[in-house]
Image: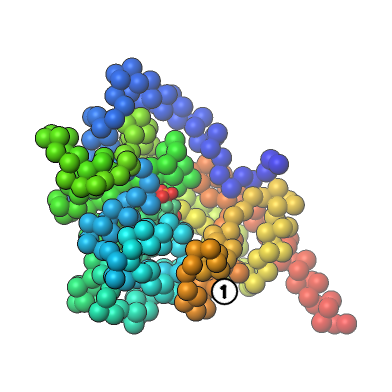
Amino acid sequence: MSYRVPFIDPREHYRRIKGEIDFAITDTLSKGDLVLRQQLRDFEQHLADFVGVKYAVGVNSCYHALHFSLLAAGVGPGDEVITVGHTFVATVSAIVHTGAKPVLVDVREDYNLDPDKFEDAVTPRTKAVIPVHLNGRVCEMDRIASIAEKRGIAVIEDAAQALGATFHGKGAGSFGLSGCFSFYPFKSLGGLGDGGAVTTNDPKIARFATLVRFNGEDRQTGEFHHHGYTALLDNVQAAVLGVKLHYLPKWIEHRRKIAGLYREGLEGIKSLRLPHFLGDEYFDSYQNYVIRTKQRNGLRQYLKDQGVETLVHWPKPMWEHTDLGLENPGLPETESICREVISLPMSAETTPEHVEIAVGCISDFFASHSAALRTASAD
Ligand SMILES: *Cc1c(COP(=O)(O)O)cnc(C)c1O
Protein backbone atom coordinates (compact mmCIF):
# COMPACT_ATOMS: atom_id res chain seq x y z
CA MET A 1 0.00 0.00 0.00
CA SER A 2 1.17 3.54 -0.45
CA TYR A 3 1.20 5.81 2.55
CA ARG A 4 0.30 9.50 2.79
CA VAL A 5 3.18 9.75 5.22
CA PRO A 6 5.87 7.15 4.50
CA PHE A 7 8.19 6.09 7.28
CA ILE A 8 11.07 6.86 4.93
CA ASP A 9 11.18 7.59 1.21
CA PRO A 10 14.26 6.14 -0.53
CA ARG A 11 13.12 7.29 -3.98
CA GLU A 12 12.79 10.90 -2.87
CA HIS A 13 16.11 10.60 -1.06
CA TYR A 14 17.81 9.55 -4.30
CA ARG A 15 15.96 12.09 -6.45
CA ARG A 16 17.29 15.01 -4.43
CA ILE A 17 20.95 14.16 -4.94
CA LYS A 18 20.72 12.01 -8.05
CA GLY A 19 23.23 14.04 -10.06
CA GLU A 20 26.01 13.67 -7.51
CA ILE A 21 25.25 10.03 -6.75
CA ASP A 22 25.16 9.08 -10.41
CA PHE A 23 28.42 10.92 -11.00
CA ALA A 24 30.12 9.17 -8.08
CA ILE A 25 29.03 5.77 -9.40
CA THR A 26 29.93 6.29 -13.05
CA ASP A 27 33.22 8.00 -12.18
CA THR A 28 34.23 5.09 -9.96
CA LEU A 29 33.15 2.47 -12.50
CA SER A 30 34.81 4.30 -15.39
CA LYS A 31 38.08 4.26 -13.51
CA GLY A 32 37.65 0.55 -12.77
CA ASP A 33 38.06 1.26 -9.08
CA LEU A 34 36.13 -1.59 -7.48
CA VAL A 35 38.07 -2.81 -4.46
CA LEU A 36 40.26 -1.04 -1.89
CA ARG A 37 40.96 2.07 -3.96
CA GLN A 38 41.21 5.81 -3.41
CA GLN A 39 37.46 6.35 -2.95
CA LEU A 40 37.49 4.04 0.06
CA ARG A 41 40.57 5.69 1.57
CA ASP A 42 39.04 9.15 1.07
CA PHE A 43 35.76 8.16 2.66
CA GLU A 44 37.55 6.54 5.61
CA GLN A 45 39.55 9.73 6.19
CA HIS A 46 36.46 11.95 6.01
CA LEU A 47 34.55 9.65 8.32
CA ALA A 48 37.39 9.60 10.86
CA ASP A 49 37.53 13.42 10.80
CA PHE A 50 33.76 13.66 11.15
CA VAL A 51 33.68 11.30 14.14
CA GLY A 52 36.80 12.84 15.67
CA VAL A 53 39.17 9.86 15.65
CA LYS A 54 42.42 8.97 13.91
CA TYR A 55 41.23 5.95 11.94
CA ALA A 56 38.12 4.63 10.24
CA VAL A 57 38.06 1.25 8.53
CA GLY A 58 35.24 0.51 6.10
CA VAL A 59 33.60 -2.90 6.44
CA ASN A 60 30.43 -4.41 5.04
CA SER A 61 28.18 -3.96 8.07
CA CYS A 62 27.98 -2.76 11.64
CA TYR A 63 27.64 -6.42 12.56
CA HIS A 64 31.17 -7.04 11.26
CA ALA A 65 32.44 -3.81 12.84
CA LEU A 66 31.20 -5.15 16.19
CA HIS A 67 32.51 -8.66 15.65
CA PHE A 68 35.97 -7.44 14.55
CA SER A 69 36.13 -4.98 17.46
CA LEU A 70 35.36 -7.75 19.95
CA LEU A 71 38.00 -10.02 18.38
CA ALA A 72 40.50 -7.16 18.43
CA ALA A 73 39.78 -6.68 22.14
CA GLY A 74 40.65 -10.34 22.67
CA VAL A 75 37.09 -11.44 23.49
CA GLY A 76 36.51 -15.18 23.15
CA PRO A 77 35.10 -18.30 24.81
CA GLY A 78 34.85 -18.04 28.59
CA ASP A 79 34.48 -14.26 28.53
CA GLU A 80 31.39 -12.20 29.25
CA VAL A 81 30.35 -9.10 27.34
CA ILE A 82 27.78 -6.74 28.81
CA THR A 83 25.28 -4.96 26.61
CA VAL A 84 21.64 -3.89 26.71
CA GLY A 85 18.60 -6.08 26.19
CA HIS A 86 17.00 -3.31 24.15
CA THR A 87 19.04 -3.34 20.95
CA PHE A 88 19.09 -4.83 17.49
CA VAL A 89 19.91 -8.53 17.50
CA ALA A 90 23.21 -7.96 15.62
CA THR A 91 24.79 -6.46 18.75
CA VAL A 92 24.22 -9.71 20.59
CA SER A 93 24.97 -11.99 17.63
CA ALA A 94 28.42 -10.39 17.35
CA ILE A 95 29.10 -11.39 20.96
CA VAL A 96 27.74 -14.90 20.50
CA HIS A 97 29.90 -15.48 17.41
CA THR A 98 33.09 -14.77 19.38
CA GLY A 99 32.14 -17.63 21.72
CA ALA A 100 31.68 -15.21 24.64
CA LYS A 101 28.52 -14.98 26.73
CA PRO A 102 26.26 -11.96 26.24
CA VAL A 103 25.12 -10.47 29.56
CA LEU A 104 22.07 -8.30 28.94
CA VAL A 105 21.16 -5.43 31.26
CA ASP A 106 18.31 -2.93 31.36
CA VAL A 107 18.11 0.53 29.83
CA ARG A 108 17.03 3.85 31.26
CA GLU A 109 14.17 6.07 30.26
CA ASP A 110 16.20 7.38 27.32
CA TYR A 111 16.54 3.79 25.97
CA ASN A 112 20.27 3.70 26.69
CA LEU A 113 22.51 1.62 28.96
CA ASP A 114 22.05 2.34 32.64
CA PRO A 115 25.60 2.81 34.03
CA ASP A 116 24.56 1.44 37.44
CA LYS A 117 23.14 -1.72 35.88
CA PHE A 118 26.35 -2.09 33.89
CA GLU A 119 28.44 -1.82 37.05
CA ASP A 120 26.24 -4.33 38.90
CA ALA A 121 26.65 -6.86 36.08
CA VAL A 122 30.46 -6.81 36.05
CA THR A 123 32.14 -10.10 37.06
CA PRO A 124 35.78 -11.23 36.89
CA ARG A 125 34.94 -12.68 33.45
CA THR A 126 33.70 -9.40 31.98
CA LYS A 127 35.96 -8.54 29.08
CA ALA A 128 34.01 -5.85 27.23
CA VAL A 129 30.92 -3.67 27.35
CA ILE A 130 28.93 -2.54 24.31
CA PRO A 131 26.97 0.63 25.02
CA VAL A 132 24.39 1.10 22.25
CA HIS A 133 23.64 4.73 21.37
CA LEU A 134 20.02 4.13 20.47
CA ASN A 135 17.85 6.34 18.28
CA GLY A 136 20.63 8.89 17.82
CA ARG A 137 21.40 9.60 21.47
CA VAL A 138 24.81 8.90 22.98
CA CYS A 139 24.98 6.91 26.22
CA GLU A 140 26.30 8.54 29.38
CA MET A 141 29.83 7.82 28.22
CA ASP A 142 31.82 9.55 30.96
CA ARG A 143 30.39 7.29 33.65
CA ILE A 144 30.45 4.17 31.49
CA ALA A 145 34.07 4.78 30.49
CA SER A 146 35.21 5.42 34.04
CA ILE A 147 33.55 2.23 35.37
CA ALA A 148 35.09 0.29 32.48
CA GLU A 149 38.52 1.74 33.05
CA LYS A 150 38.43 0.98 36.77
CA ARG A 151 37.53 -2.64 36.06
CA GLY A 152 39.79 -3.14 33.03
CA ILE A 153 36.93 -3.62 30.57
CA ALA A 154 37.10 -2.71 26.87
CA VAL A 155 34.43 -0.29 25.63
CA ILE A 156 33.09 -0.99 22.15
CA GLU A 157 30.41 1.46 21.06
CA ASP A 158 27.49 0.32 18.96
CA ALA A 159 27.03 3.64 17.20
CA ALA A 160 24.95 2.22 14.33
CA GLN A 161 22.18 4.72 15.09
CA ALA A 162 24.24 7.66 16.23
CA LEU A 163 26.61 8.99 13.56
CA GLY A 164 26.83 12.74 14.25
CA ALA A 165 25.35 12.60 17.75
CA THR A 166 27.59 13.97 20.51
CA PHE A 167 28.01 13.98 24.29
CA HIS A 168 29.91 16.91 25.81
CA GLY A 169 30.81 17.81 22.22
CA LYS A 170 32.49 14.45 21.52
CA GLY A 171 31.19 12.32 18.68
CA ALA A 172 29.54 8.92 19.03
CA GLY A 173 32.17 6.35 18.11
CA SER A 174 35.09 8.33 19.57
CA PHE A 175 34.83 7.33 23.24
CA GLY A 176 35.70 3.66 23.33
CA LEU A 177 38.40 1.34 22.11
CA SER A 178 36.34 1.44 18.93
CA GLY A 179 33.08 2.71 17.49
CA CYS A 180 30.90 0.64 15.17
CA PHE A 181 28.77 2.21 12.46
CA SER A 182 26.18 0.98 9.99
CA PHE A 183 25.48 2.34 6.51
CA TYR A 184 22.47 0.11 6.01
CA PRO A 185 20.26 2.12 3.62
CA PHE A 186 17.86 3.31 6.30
CA LYS A 187 20.41 4.63 8.78
CA SER A 188 21.06 8.39 8.76
CA LEU A 189 24.04 7.83 6.48
CA GLY A 190 22.75 5.07 4.26
CA GLY A 191 24.52 3.39 1.37
CA LEU A 192 23.24 1.32 -1.53
CA GLY A 193 23.07 -1.83 0.56
CA ASP A 194 24.95 -3.14 3.56
CA GLY A 195 27.96 -1.22 4.81
CA GLY A 196 29.67 -0.24 8.03
CA ALA A 197 32.85 1.03 9.65
CA VAL A 198 35.08 0.70 12.67
CA THR A 199 36.40 3.95 14.14
CA THR A 200 39.30 4.06 16.58
CA ASN A 201 42.30 6.01 17.83
CA ASP A 202 44.27 2.80 18.31
CA PRO A 203 46.49 1.88 15.33
CA LYS A 204 46.47 -1.80 16.38
CA ILE A 205 42.67 -1.96 16.21
CA ALA A 206 42.64 -0.19 12.85
CA ARG A 207 45.25 -2.57 11.45
CA PHE A 208 43.44 -5.62 12.80
CA ALA A 209 40.15 -4.55 11.18
CA THR A 210 41.97 -3.70 7.93
CA LEU A 211 43.47 -7.20 7.79
CA VAL A 212 40.52 -9.32 8.86
CA ARG A 213 38.04 -7.57 6.56
CA PHE A 214 40.07 -8.92 3.63
CA ASN A 215 40.95 -12.52 4.47
CA GLY A 216 43.70 -11.49 6.86
CA GLU A 217 45.97 -10.30 4.09
CA ASP A 218 48.42 -7.44 4.32
CA ARG A 219 48.05 -5.97 0.84
CA GLN A 220 51.52 -4.43 0.92
CA THR A 221 53.39 -7.65 1.58
CA GLY A 222 50.92 -10.35 0.54
CA GLU A 223 51.39 -11.96 3.94
CA PHE A 224 48.30 -13.51 5.58
CA HIS A 225 48.29 -12.64 9.29
CA HIS A 226 44.89 -14.00 10.38
CA HIS A 227 42.20 -16.40 9.31
CA GLY A 228 40.06 -13.48 8.27
CA TYR A 229 36.72 -12.73 6.67
CA THR A 230 35.40 -11.33 3.41
CA ALA A 231 33.84 -8.14 4.65
CA LEU A 232 34.95 -5.12 2.66
CA LEU A 233 33.14 -1.88 2.21
CA ASP A 234 32.94 -1.81 -1.58
CA ASN A 235 34.59 1.02 -3.39
CA VAL A 236 31.45 2.17 -5.23
CA GLN A 237 29.65 2.26 -1.90
CA ALA A 238 32.42 4.33 -0.39
CA ALA A 239 32.21 6.82 -3.26
CA VAL A 240 28.46 7.22 -2.74
CA LEU A 241 28.80 7.45 1.05
CA GLY A 242 31.46 10.10 0.53
CA VAL A 243 28.93 12.24 -1.35
CA LYS A 244 26.29 11.74 1.32
CA LEU A 245 28.61 12.46 4.24
CA HIS A 246 28.80 16.08 3.06
CA TYR A 247 25.03 16.35 3.50
CA LEU A 248 24.86 14.62 6.85
CA PRO A 249 25.16 17.71 9.10
CA LYS A 250 22.31 19.33 7.16
CA TRP A 251 20.24 16.15 7.37
CA ILE A 252 20.78 15.93 11.11
CA GLU A 253 19.69 19.55 11.53
CA HIS A 254 16.59 18.67 9.54
CA ARG A 255 15.87 15.66 11.75
CA ARG A 256 16.21 17.82 14.84
CA LYS A 257 13.79 20.33 13.34
CA ILE A 258 11.28 17.56 12.59
CA ALA A 259 11.70 16.27 16.16
CA GLY A 260 10.94 19.79 17.43
CA LEU A 261 7.77 19.91 15.33
CA TYR A 262 6.61 16.56 16.70
CA ARG A 263 7.27 17.88 20.18
CA GLU A 264 5.21 21.03 19.63
CA GLY A 265 2.37 19.00 18.19
CA LEU A 266 2.34 16.16 20.71
CA GLU A 267 3.51 17.48 24.06
CA GLY A 268 -0.04 18.25 25.21
CA ILE A 269 -1.09 14.58 25.00
CA LYS A 270 -0.87 13.13 28.50
CA SER A 271 -0.82 9.45 27.49
CA LEU A 272 2.35 9.91 25.43
CA ARG A 273 5.99 9.96 26.41
CA LEU A 274 8.15 11.87 23.95
CA PRO A 275 11.89 11.39 23.32
CA HIS A 276 13.10 14.73 24.63
CA PHE A 277 15.37 13.93 27.53
CA LEU A 278 17.22 16.18 29.91
CA GLY A 279 20.84 17.16 29.51
CA ASP A 280 22.45 20.04 27.59
CA GLU A 281 25.53 17.85 27.21
CA TYR A 282 23.66 15.64 24.71
CA PHE A 283 23.25 16.48 21.03
CA ASP A 284 20.79 13.94 19.63
CA SER A 285 20.73 13.09 15.92
CA TYR A 286 17.25 11.48 15.91
CA GLN A 287 17.92 8.37 13.88
CA ASN A 288 14.43 7.48 15.11
CA TYR A 289 11.66 9.47 16.72
CA VAL A 290 10.25 7.04 19.26
CA ILE A 291 7.18 7.76 21.34
CA ARG A 292 5.76 5.61 24.09
CA THR A 293 2.17 4.83 25.03
CA LYS A 294 0.18 2.05 26.67
CA GLN A 295 -2.18 2.18 23.67
CA ARG A 296 0.60 1.41 21.22
CA ASN A 297 -1.10 -1.32 19.20
CA GLY A 298 -4.35 0.61 18.82
CA LEU A 299 -2.50 3.77 17.85
CA ARG A 300 -0.36 1.93 15.32
CA GLN A 301 -3.38 0.36 13.62
CA TYR A 302 -5.19 3.70 13.56
CA LEU A 303 -2.19 5.44 11.97
CA LYS A 304 -1.92 2.68 9.38
CA ASP A 305 -5.60 3.09 8.51
CA GLN A 306 -4.99 6.82 8.11
CA GLY A 307 -2.01 6.27 5.80
CA VAL A 308 0.74 7.06 8.29
CA GLU A 309 3.50 4.45 8.25
CA THR A 310 5.20 3.58 11.53
CA LEU A 311 7.61 0.93 12.78
CA VAL A 312 8.16 -0.76 16.12
CA HIS A 313 11.74 -1.22 17.31
CA TRP A 314 11.27 -3.93 18.59
CA PRO A 315 7.96 -5.69 19.29
CA LYS A 316 9.36 -8.43 21.50
CA PRO A 317 12.47 -8.83 23.63
CA MET A 318 15.27 -10.72 21.97
CA TRP A 319 15.15 -13.64 24.40
CA GLU A 320 11.56 -14.37 23.43
CA HIS A 321 12.88 -15.43 20.02
CA THR A 322 13.47 -18.81 21.55
CA ASP A 323 15.57 -20.23 18.71
CA LEU A 324 18.30 -17.74 19.66
CA GLY A 325 18.84 -19.69 22.86
CA LEU A 326 19.23 -16.64 25.10
CA GLU A 327 18.35 -16.80 28.79
CA ASN A 328 15.58 -14.49 29.94
CA PRO A 329 17.59 -11.87 31.84
CA GLY A 330 14.45 -10.42 33.49
CA LEU A 331 14.60 -6.81 32.32
CA PRO A 332 11.32 -5.07 33.18
CA GLU A 333 12.11 -1.76 31.48
CA THR A 334 13.11 -3.46 28.22
CA GLU A 335 9.91 -5.54 28.33
CA SER A 336 7.61 -2.59 28.82
CA ILE A 337 9.47 -0.64 26.12
CA CYS A 338 8.77 -3.47 23.68
CA ARG A 339 5.07 -3.20 24.49
CA GLU A 340 4.87 0.60 24.36
CA VAL A 341 7.16 2.08 21.71
CA ILE A 342 6.31 3.22 18.23
CA SER A 343 8.66 4.99 15.81
CA LEU A 344 7.13 7.84 13.82
CA PRO A 345 8.16 8.83 10.28
CA MET A 346 11.61 10.44 10.49
CA SER A 347 14.16 11.03 7.75
CA ALA A 348 15.91 13.80 5.86
CA GLU A 349 12.88 13.78 3.53
CA THR A 350 10.18 13.98 6.20
CA THR A 351 8.42 17.32 5.70
CA PRO A 352 6.58 19.64 8.13
CA GLU A 353 3.40 18.65 6.25
CA HIS A 354 4.08 14.99 7.01
CA VAL A 355 4.45 15.86 10.67
CA GLU A 356 1.24 17.88 10.63
CA ILE A 357 -0.70 14.92 9.21
CA ALA A 358 0.85 12.45 11.67
CA VAL A 359 0.30 14.75 14.65
CA GLY A 360 -3.31 15.36 13.57
CA CYS A 361 -4.00 11.62 13.41
CA ILE A 362 -2.35 10.95 16.77
CA SER A 363 -4.34 13.77 18.39
CA ASP A 364 -7.58 12.43 16.89
CA PHE A 365 -6.79 8.95 18.15
CA PHE A 366 -6.26 10.08 21.73
CA ALA A 367 -9.20 12.51 21.64
CA SER A 368 -11.62 9.75 20.60
CA HIS A 369 -9.91 7.25 22.87
CA SER A 370 -10.26 9.41 25.98
CA ALA A 371 -13.83 10.30 24.97
CA ALA A 372 -14.53 6.55 24.78
CA LEU A 373 -12.90 6.07 28.18
CA ARG A 374 -15.03 8.85 29.71
CA THR A 375 -18.18 7.28 28.28
CA ALA A 376 -17.16 3.88 29.57
CA SER A 377 -16.50 5.15 33.08
CA ALA A 378 -19.78 7.15 33.11
CA ASP A 379 -21.76 3.94 32.42
C1 LIG B 1 21.35 -1.36 12.34
C2 LIG B 1 21.96 -1.73 13.62
C3 LIG B 1 22.98 -2.69 13.71
C4 LIG B 1 23.41 -3.55 12.56
O1 LIG B 1 23.88 -2.85 11.48
P1 LIG B 1 24.21 -3.65 10.13
O2 LIG B 1 25.04 -2.67 9.36
O3 LIG B 1 22.92 -3.97 9.48
O4 LIG B 1 24.98 -4.87 10.50
C5 LIG B 1 23.55 -2.92 14.95
N1 LIG B 1 23.15 -2.26 16.04
C6 LIG B 1 22.16 -1.34 15.99
C7 LIG B 1 21.77 -0.63 17.24
C8 LIG B 1 21.52 -1.06 14.78
O5 LIG B 1 20.52 -0.18 14.75
Q: Which residue is mark 1?
A: 336
Q: State the residue in front, 54 or 316.
A: 316
Please name the residue shown 38% across and 72% down the image. Answer: 103
| Residue 33 seen by the camera | yes
Q: Position of residue 370 (x, y in %)?
A: 75, 72
Q: Position of residue 318 (x, y in %)?
A: 51, 65
Residue at the limit of the structure toward the left, as seen here? 221
Q: Secondary structure at mark 1?
A: helix
Quadrant of the image occupied by residue 295: bottom right
- Looking at the image, residue 28 sits to the left or right of residue 304; the answer is left
Q: Position of residue 50 (x, y in %)?
A: 27, 46
Q: Is residue 341 above or below residue 305?
A: below
Image quadrant in which the C terminus is located = bottom right
Q: Position of residue 22 (x, y in %)?
A: 42, 24
Q: Give the residue type that dot 1 points to.
A: Ser
Q: State the residue in front, 224 or 318.
A: 224
- Looking at the image, residue 32 sits to the left or right of residue 258; the answer is left
- Looking at the image, residue 93 sits to the left or right of residue 40; the answer is right
Image quadrant in which the N terminus is located = top right
Q: Is residue 228 above or below residue 261?
A: above
Q: State the residue in front, 93 or 309.
A: 93
